[in-house]
Amino acid sequence: MSDVGGTGTAVGAPRVVPLRDNAGFRLLWIGQLLSDTGSETGRLAYPLLILALTHSAVLAGAVGTARAIAVFCVQLPGGPLADRFDRRLTMIACDTMRALLLALLAVLIVVQLASWPVVLVVSLIEGAAGAIFNPAASAALPAIVPDGQLERAWAATEARMYGASLAGPALGGALFALGRAIPFLADAVSYAASFGTVSRIKGSFRPERTATRKALWREVADGLRVVWQVPVLRTVVIAAPLVNFAFTGVFFTITLALRQHGTSTAVIGLVQAAIAAGGLLGAVLAPRLQGRLRLSTMVATIDTAGALLFGVAALLIASPLVAVPVALSMLLAPAVNASLVAVMLRSAPEEMRGRVSNTVLMAATALSTLAPLAAGLFVQHVSAAWAIGAFAVAMTAAAVIGQLLPGLREAEALAAAPDRK
C-alpha cells in the first residue's frame, strides 16, 4: 500500500501516527466539514423554497421524498462504482458536478426561472451525486487511517457531520431570509472547497485487488450477499430503517410545523441547529463511551429514549423548545454509529468496501425516503403532534427488533477481538 496521509512507510509497513497528524484524514475532514455545512444549508433551503413557491406542505414533502428515492436508487450501483474506479477521483468528479449544479440553481432563482419542477430536478441530481460520493469516501477511509483508529476516525467524522448540522440550518435560515438564492450559492462554494481539499490527498485509492469484473448488478448482488451473511450487518439493515425513518420524519415535521405557525426561517434554522448540538455533544463524548458501554445497551437506550423524547416533542411542536427533547435523543447516536461503521469496514473485503458500505447505507435509509412525504401528509391533514407520535412508534419497534436479533451481541465480541491492529 502506498503512503497515504502519513500512515505508512516506504516498504508498506504501517506507521501509526496520531489522527490529528494524519494529513490525508485532516484534508478529507476539513473539506467535508465545509461540504457538509453547505449541504445542511441547502437541506433546509429546499423545503423553504418549495413552500415559498407553492405554499404546499405536501408538495414540499413530496420533493423531499423524491430526492430521497433518487438517492436510494443510486446507492446500490454507487457501491460497485466506488470499487471499480479511483475513489479520490470519484469524489472530485461528484464535488465538481454539485458545485456547478448549485451555482446554476442560484442563477435561475435570481432571474426568477426556478419553478418547483426545476428545484426538484436539481435536488434529484445533487442527491444522486452525493450517493456516489459517500461510498467512495467511506471505502477510502481504511487507506487513510490504520485499522486501530477506525472508531476514533469515525467519531471525528460524526463530530464533523453534527457540527455541520449545527451550523448549516442556522446559516441556511439566515441566508434564505436575506435572499432565496444565497443558501444555494453558499452550497456551491462549499462543494468547490471540498474539491480543493480532496484533490490534495496523496496516494492511490484504486482497490488493490483486481478480480475479474462482473456485470454491475451482479456486483451489487455480491454486496447484498456479504451484508446478509454478517449477523450484525443483517441486524442493522432490519432495525436501522425504522430509526432513520423516525429521525428524518421528526426533523422534517418540525420545519413544516414551525413554518405553519409563522416562525421565521432564521428561528427554524436555529431550532435545527440546536438539535444538531445534541449530536455534536454526543460525538465529543463518543470516544469516552466506546468500550465502557456495550453496543447493544447503547442501541437499546437510543431507541427507547428516542421514542419517549419524541413523545415530549409532540407536546412542544408549536414552540422552538421542541429542539430540547429531540437534541437529547441524539446524544448516543455518534458512539453507536462509530462502532457499527468500524465493524462494517472490518467485515468487508477491501475490494468490496464500497459495495458493502453502500448496501448497508441504502438499506438503513430506505424507509426514510418516505418520511418527508409522511410528515407533509400528517402536518397538512392531521396534525404535527400526531406525526411525531407516529415516528415515536417507529422508534419503539426498532428497540424491540434490535434486542430480539443476536447481531449486536456478536458485534461486541468482534470489537473485543485480540487481533485488532
Image (cartoon, grey):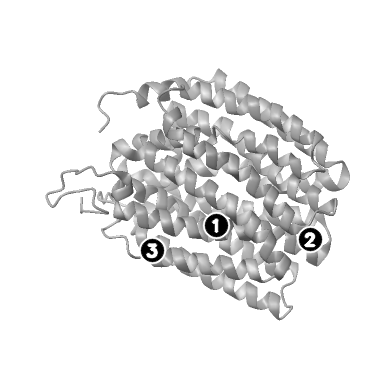
As drawn, the label of residue 163 is none
Query: Residue sitting at 32 percent across and 64 percent down?
Result: 200
Q: Earlier in the sequence, mark 3 or mark 2?
A: 2
Per the image, the residue denoted by label 3 is 197
* Location of residue 231 (image quadrant): top left
Per the image, the residue denoted by label 1 is 37
Q: Earlier in the sequence, mark 2 or mark 1?
A: 1
Residue type highlighted by circle 3: Thr
Pointers 2 and 1 in contact (CB under 8 A)?
no
Q: Residues within 10 Å of mark 2 (few under 14, many from 20)?
A: many
Mark 1, secondary structure of its residue? helix
Residue 94 screen position, x and y as percent: 46, 64
The residues bearing labels 3 and 2 have C-alpha atoms spaced at a distance of 35 Å
* Location of residue 125 (image quadrant): bottom right
Pointers 3 and 2 in contact (CB under 8 A)?
no
Residue type highlighted by circle 2: Leu
Q: Is residue 334 left or right of residue 226?
A: right
Q: Earlier in the sequence, mark 1 or mark 3?
A: 1
Q: Is residue 392 visible?
A: yes
Mark 3, secondary structure of its residue? helix
Query: Residue sitting at 31 percent across and 60 percent down?
Result: 201
Pointers 1 and 3 in contact (CB under 8 A)?
no
As drawn, the label of residue 51 is 2
Q: Nearer the viewer, mark 3 or mark 2?
A: 3
Q: Is residue 14 left or right of residue 39?
A: left
Q: Is residue 215 visible?
A: no
